[in-house]
Structures are given as C-alpha cells and as structure tokens.
Image: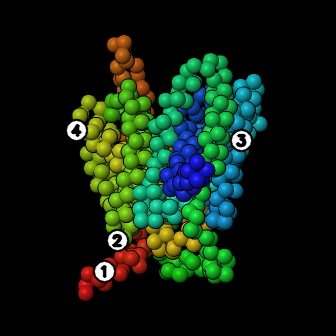
Amino acid sequence: MGKGNETNTKGWRSNKWIRAAIPALLLHCSIGTVYCWSIFSQEIADYIGFSKGATEWAFSFAIFFLGMSAAFLGNVVEKDIHKSSLIAAICFASGMAGTGFFIYYGGTHQGSMLALIGIYVCYGFIMGVGLGTGYLSPVKTLMLWFEDRKGLATGLAVAGFGAAKAIASPIMQAMLDNLGEGGIYKMFLILAVVYFVMMFVGHLLLKKPEGWHEPQSKEKGKSMLAVIKSKPIANYVGIWLMFYINITCGLALISQEKMIVKCIGLAGAVGVISTVSAVFNAGGRLGFSAWADTMKDRNTIYKLIFVLSIVFTGIVMLTGGIKNGNGNMLLTVLVLCLIFVVNAGYGGGFSNVPTLLSDHYGMSNISAIHGLTLSAWGFAGLTGNQMASWIVKTFGAPVEIEHALSDGSVEMLTVNPTGYQAVLYATIVLYVLALVISLILVRPTDKALEAKKAKKK
C-alpha cells in the first residue's frame, strides 16, 4: 500500500502535464485577461469622471511594463521559476485589487487625479510586472518537458494567454451587468482573489524535469550578450524587429477591430466577432507553433505569417473593403478574413519567439534572452494603438451610418471608414518591411543548414 502511494506520488510529480502544461495554462489564462481591457475601459472612465482616452494609458502602460519587466527580470526567471511565478501571482493579483480600490476611490471623488494615477500604477506598473514574470515563468519549463515538440508546448501555454479574453470577456460582462452599483470595482476585487488562487496553484505545481540541472556560471561561461553575439548581431536585431513589427501591426488593427466591424454593417455582431477573433488569436498561437515543429527552420513560419498578412491587407486595401463593405457581402467577408488572419498571425508571432531563440542560441539562457526580446512587446504596446488612433483622427471624417436594432428600430452610429481604411496603408508597409527583415537579417538555424548540406550530399 505504501509503495503504491509512493509510486502514484512519484507519477504525478514527474508528469509533464501536471508539472508544466497545467500550471502554464493557469498562469497564462489569468494574466491573459489584460486583453479584456476594452470590455470595461469605458465603464472605468465614466465611473471615475475621466475621458476614455485618459484611462486608455493604463492598458498601454501595462503592456509596456510587461515587456520591460520581462527584459529586466529574465535572469530571475532563469535562476528560479518558483520565485518568479510567486512574484507574478502577487503582483498581478495585488495590482488588480489596487485597481479596484482606486476605481472605488474615483467613484467617490469624481475627477480625482489620485484615482487616475493610482489606476496607472496598479493596472499599468504593478500588474505589468506580474504580466512579464508570469508570461516568462512557464516557457522554458515547457520546452524542457516537451523537448521533441517545443513549439506545441509553448503554443499551448501562449494559446492560454490568447484564449483568456474569449473565456473571461462574457464572465466580466455578466459581472458588470449583475453586481449593481459599483459593479466595476467589485469585479476587480473579486477577480483579484480568483486569479491569485489560480496563479498560486500554478506556482505550486510548476517544476522543471528531475533530470535537468541549470548550468552553473562556470558551465555557462558566457554572458547573455556574449550568447547573442555568438551569431551575427544582425540576426538577433532581425528577430527583435520582426517581432516588434508584427505586434505593432496586430495591435493597430485589433485596437480598431470593434469600429471596423461597425463600419461593415455588423454592429450587432461585434461581441460574437470579438470572440471568434480571440479564438483565431489562440489558434494561431497553437497552430503556427505546432506547424513550426515540422519545419527545418522556424523562421519560415514568420515568412508565412507576413505573406498572409500582406496578401489579405492588400486585398482589403485595393477593394476599399472597410469603406465599401457595408451592404456588400463579398467585401464584408474579406474584411472579416483580414481580421481573423491578423489575429492568428499576431498570436503565432508570440508562440514561435522562444522556440526560434532556442534554436539559434540554445536553452541555457533562453529565459533571459526571451525576456529581453519581449521588450519589443513593451514598445509595441505604446506605438501600435497610438499609431492607429493618430491615423484615424488625421485621415477622413466621422460619418453616420444606420444600424438596425433587434426591436426593428434604427440607431445612428458615428464611424470613420476612411480613417480605418488608412490604417491598412501603414500596416502593409510595415508587414513588407518585416518580411524583408526575415529574409535578409535572420539567418537559417544550424539545424536548417545541416539539413541543407545533407540534402546536397
């Protein structure tokens, strides 16, 4: 009996799903809810007495500090995933609870700068640190447990980050509808507890394989900079830039997705389309990374993502799909295809970065190098949304379109189809630049070169 219990205990302790996949999903499905911001941003603005534009910076700061904390705390993750995953759980949950408190304070002190700054600090900085460390913590562990299918493993976890929006959005909306007066701050306080429990369980379960021993400093022998310099420096710069551009273009379109859908006459289906696009985002993370496992050079996936994005952006740009899609079924379908392709490519870009880096630079310093590369996400968080907003404000003019309600009445919606169409001109140029970078700067991996030599023989 004792031996049986010992065997069972040893079994779950060495099970890659319990020690890597499940904790990764618990961590990523919690922190991925940062992308639910659009669900409640207007409610926060109204409750504390500020414009939506003023509160939007909280989300931008959260993405920026996600990237920066990943870059600066990558070495902490490298050395101790238990410490980093605990930091993630504490920072994310306390940041969420702090955001709830300052929303409550803003509701009782309308227009208070203290409330707005408190939200910036809690949602932007404190939660941002939790996001960066929580995002990194399970990645290397997954690649160690799933050594033969690294892409599938990291795709699974990162898909949890993408799927979090689809899972949490209806729950958050239901809470806002049913918690009564002050539902917005109550929601944050309740979810802070829920996500802390989820992340803490993930922290307890997360463990590297028994056979893996982190190389000591003498074994590593090289600093992270020296590891990056082991290949031409342009190689790493190319990976960083194409990652940055893919996120910038993705955020530029995704941030305007709701209004683009209204432009093509589908205002009543915004919620459904948002959920479907979130599924494509998650599917791209899992599908593109699993597909890359079958390729000799993972950079091929980025080339495919950029080509698909260029093709669909070009088609909608040339047909004026956003401007002319209202009432035209073919153009409506093309615009929806563009939204889904960009979401899938946006997600796939995330899931393939750690495995592409490990193929080029090895596993010894992967958490630190991956963290440094995520700084691209931080900068893209500040530029993607803001670039799209500036283009929409600068080009075209607001127009009113009719939207039929379920009761048969009609309401007028104010949109700027020309402005949203103009965003595509910027993104297609950036996608072409990213494709050129992936072709010229990012070198083939050693595995790809060896396969090429073997084929010639």
Contact? badges 2 and 3 (CB < 8 Å)? no
For disc 2, the neighbor class at 10 Å (few under 14, some 14 to 19, many from 20) is: some
Helix, strand or loop status at disc 1 = helix
Q: Residue 238's x, y, as percent? A: 47, 70
Q: Residue 177's x, y, as percent? A: 55, 21
Which quarter of the picture shows residue 206? bottom right
Residue type at mark 4 is Leu
- Is residue 177 placed above or below 247 in the rendered structure? above
The residue positioned farthest toward the front in the image shown: 1
Quadrant of the rendering where the C terminus is positioned: bottom left
Q: Residues under labels 2 and 3: Cα distance?
A: 43 Å
Residue drawn at (37%, 70%), measured in percent from left and top?
A: 297
- Is residue 220 placed above or below 202 in the rendered structure? below
Residue drawn at (68%, 31%), measured in percent from left and top?
A: 189
- Viewer-nearest residue: 426 or 171: 171
For disc 4, the neighbor class at 10 Å (few under 14, some 14 to 19, many from 20) is: few
Q: Which residue is mark 4?
A: 330
Q: Which residue is mark 3?
A: 94
Q: Which residue is mark 2?
A: 296
Q: Which residue is mark 1?
A: 452
Residue drawn at (34%, 54%), measured in percent from left and top?
A: 309
Helix, strand or loop status at disc 4 = helix
Helix, strand or loop status at disc 2 = loop
Helix, strand or loop status at disc 3 = helix
